[in-house]
Structures are given as C-alpha cells and as structure tokens.
Image: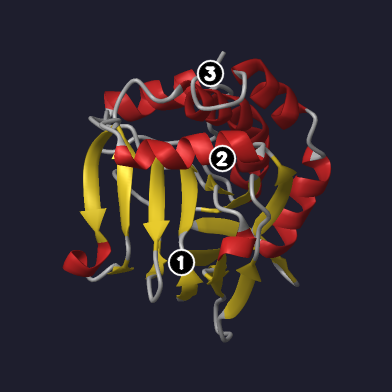
Amino acid sequence: MATEGKPAADVKATVDALDWAAIGAEIDAYGVARTGPLLNPATCAALAALYAQERFRSRVIMKRHGFGSGEYKYFADPLPETVATLREAVYPHAARIANGWADRLAMDRYPATLGEMLARCHAEGQEKPTPLILKYGPGDYNCLHQDLYGAVAFPLQLVVLLSDPAGFEGGELVLTEQRPRMQSRAEVVTLAQGEGALFTTSVRPRRGTKGDHRVMLRHGVSRLRSGERYTLGVIFHDAA
C-alpha cells in the first residue's frame, strides 16, 4: 500500500478509467482539460503533509527569483509511491495526445512509456526528478511561465489540487495562449480537491483556416486571497 494514503493500484485504475477521448478533445480546443477526481481527500492530505518532511531535493522561494510569491519543493528520488504511480499511469494517455500533436506539427514523436521518456532525458543529462509540491499562503501567486528544464521536454503536464477549496479563496490556475497576429487568450481553471488539470507545457497545435499552426502557452496561479493552498505538480520530463 502506498504510504501517502491511497493504494497505487487504485490510482492507476482511476487514471485508466478516465474519459481520455473527452480530455484529449478539450485539450485540443483549449490547451487544458480537467481530469475529474484522481486522488481521494485522505491521499491529498497525506501528500500535502509530506511538505514538512525530508523528501525533497530542493526548495524554491519564488520571491527570491522573481517568480511570484510562495514556495515549492521538488521531490528527491525515489518519488513517493503515489506520485510515481500517478506519473507513470497518466503518461501513456498523455503521450497519445502528444503524438497526435507531433504528427500535426511534423515534429518528432514521443516515447510510448514514461521509462523511455525519462531515458531520453537522462541521455541528455536531465537526471533530476521534477514532480513537486507548491505551497501558497495569503497574497501568494505564481507568475506566468513554462516548465522547461533542458533540451528534452514533454508537451503536457499535470497539476492536482491537494487542498480543500473551502479552505482558501483565489489561487486559480491561469493559462494564456499567444496566437500569431492576434491578442492573447486567457483560460482560468478551478479544481476540486483531488482533481487534476492536464495542460500544455509550452507549444500546441491550433487549427486555422490554412491548417495547423503553433501557439504558445504559459501558465501561472492567481493571487491567493485567503487560506492555504497545496498542489501537486507532475512534469513528465526530468531536469538538468
């Protein structure tokens, strides 16, 4: 049994049972899709509680780097079982979406399994794990950015809300899409506890009158007005 609250087999079964066709269609249309519930409240609480433990390779204070306000920690290897299972279970479904995009944009395709994807990262010197927990308090926010850590990057990533939304106000996931010769478009996403959002890491295809073209997305978190907010970030490429 996973030590973070939910058996790993249950996490995989939950992921595999999601409506991936609908998720893929929504990401194609908007660059982001809510997954529905991934983790139960007990698992969310157990993962958030790890933040105070020695399970991490680094801690980042956002204000020191101009990233916003708040902080986050990257997990060290080995990843907690629930996090590792979630990452491995979501990846093949995300890879099918990503390879559809790669075909449309005439780009190289992505490996079918997370193990192969990480091997590609490690061959390029990107060996540091990237799953993380982010912690926000009143007034904290995250500037618009992209999570790119080297030459190898996977075009989708996952965030899961660990906190109960009744315990905080604000703190929405915000995405902006930069479209050629057009003004940017914003998307704002609110999540239930344990629910995930799968979204574009950097570039995705968008169908226009003359076929597909690339659009650039950045993501961040709006200002937390009150309370405390923890999220789990699952990035599928490792860092240099």
Is 101 in front, or is 227? 227
Residue 222 can be seen in this image: no
Kindly identify the amino acid type of the residue bearing the numbered disc 1. Gly
Q: Is residue 97 left or right of residue 174?
A: right
Kindly identify the amino acid type of the residue bearing the numbered disc 3. Ala
Q: Are marks 2 and 1 in contact (CB under 8 Å)?
A: no
The quadrant in which the C terminus is found is top left
Give the residue at mark 1.
220
Q: Residue at x 72, y 69 (%)?
A: 210
Per the image, label 1 sits on a secondary structure element best described as strand
Give the residue at mark 3.
2
Between the residue at mark 3 and the residue at mark 2, the CA separation in whole angstroms equals 12 Å
Residue 28 lies, in percent from the top left, at 71, 56
Between the residue at mark 2 and the residue at mark 1, the CA separation in whole angstroms equals 21 Å
Mark 3 or 1, closer to the camera: 3
Per the image, label 3 sits on a secondary structure element best described as loop
Q: Is residue 217 above or below residue 85?
A: below
Q: Residue at x 55, y 81 (%)?
A: 184
Alpha-carbon neighbours of circle 1 within 10 Å: few (<14), some, or many (≥20)? many
Give the residue at mark 2.
44
Q: Residue at x 40, y 45 (%)?
A: 133
Residue 106 lies, in percent from the top left, at 57, 46
